């Protein structure tokens, strides 16, 4: 089975207790700043900012930090973060897309390249691996949103393309241009989602064994430790039995 969502959830559970709180707030704060700079500082008029604030609050980020991040986007000394994307192959020849927010592209590409090299991967050129993925809108809910049938019906009514449900929650996919409209429609039925963003969905997957899966853990952990890295996508496939062993 494709282990994309399940593997990410396992990684999150294993790493949550070790993740530095300040580092998490840094990543959340950058997303708030960029969202406010691109779409304005009013959450009611800026869906991306509203989602970023909701996600920050779900992680217990203090309101003072949130307000400071918004002010950084509008003040005279506004932080000039840029969105950057890096592509390459990680352990097991898995295709990887790294999305970052950076104020220094030279520093970020050097840091990302070092992680790829240290873990036996290779950083490629732009568009060197994205042909393995579809660009999609992704809306995520936890299991508390309802059972698979309930979420599927709500997603269809809201205009979504596809839904993947598991014990960890629900991934709802949309056309990229439809993301915010579907998000607003489905939130009226299921409440605010945990996340709503553009993402990369694998077209084809690369099977990995248990040894390679452990290497992928270490590789993705190292990427997540970089302050500039916001999220990653990859096209691995992991057997159900291996997933259970990794989550034990």
Image: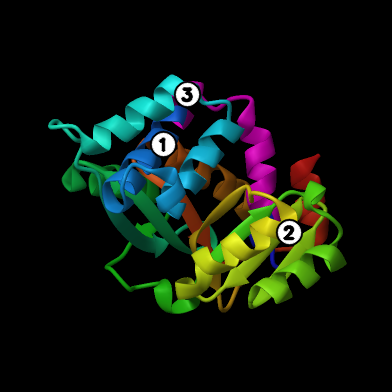
**Residue sitting at 78 percent across and 70 percent down?**
152
Residue found at x 32% / y 73%: 127
Q: Decide: is 185 above or below 37.
A: below
List the residue tagged with mark 3. 63
The kind of secondary structure the magenta stretch mainly shows is helix
Q: Please state the horizontal and vertical placement of residue 93, each as a whole percent of the image.
A: 49, 65
* Residue at (38, 37) in percent of width and height: 226
Label 1 sits on residue: 27
Q: Which residue is more in the foreground, 148 or 186?
A: 186
Q: Which mark is residue 189?
A: 2
Q: Are marks 3 and 1 in contact (CB under 8 Å)?
A: no
Q: Are circles 2 and 1 on residues that touch, CB within 8 Å?
A: no
Q: CA distance from mark 3 to mark 2?
A: 27 Å
Q: Is residue 212 left or right of residue 84?
A: right
Q: Nearer the viewer, mark 3 or mark 1?
A: 3
Magenta stretch, residue numbers: 6-24
In magenta stretch: residue 13: yes
- Which structural element holds mark 1? helix
In this view of the protein, which residue sits in the foreground, 11 or 80? Answer: 80
Describe the element under mark 3 as helix, strand or loop.
helix
Residue at 31%, 65% in the rendered image: 124
Percent position of residue 230, x then y: 42, 46
């Amino acid at each position: 089975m494709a282990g994309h969502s399940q593997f990410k959830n396992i990684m999150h559970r294993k790493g949550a207790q070790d993740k530095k709180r300040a580092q998490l707030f840094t990543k959340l704060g950058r997303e708030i700043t960029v969202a406010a700079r691109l779409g304005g500082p009013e959450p009611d008029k800026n869906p991306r900012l509203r989602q970023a604030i909701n996600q920050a609050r779900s992680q217990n980020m203090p309101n003072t930090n949130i307000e400071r991040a918004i002010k950084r986007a509008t003040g005279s000394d506004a932080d000039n973060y840029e969105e950057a994307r890096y592509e390459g192959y990680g352990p097991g020849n898995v295709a990887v897309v790294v999305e970052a927010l950076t104020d220094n592209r030279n520093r970020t590409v050097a840091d990302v390249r070092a992680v790829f090299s240290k873990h036996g991967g290779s950083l490629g050129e732009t568009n060197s691996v994205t042909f393995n993925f579809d660009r999609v809108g992704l809306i995520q809910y936890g299991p508390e949103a309802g059972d698979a049938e309930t979420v599927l019906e709500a997603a269809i009514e809201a205009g979504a393309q596809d839904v993947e449900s598991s014990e960890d929650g629900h991934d709802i996919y949309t056309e990229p241009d439809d993301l915010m409209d579907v998000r607003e429609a489905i939130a009226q039925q299921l409440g605010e989602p945990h996340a709503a963003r553009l993402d990369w969905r694998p077209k084809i997957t690369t099977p990995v064994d248990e040894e390679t899966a452990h290497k992928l853990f270490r590789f993705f952990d190292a990427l997540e430790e970089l302050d500039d890295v916001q999220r990653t996508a990859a096209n691995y496939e992991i057997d159900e039995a291996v997933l259970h062993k990794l989550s034990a």
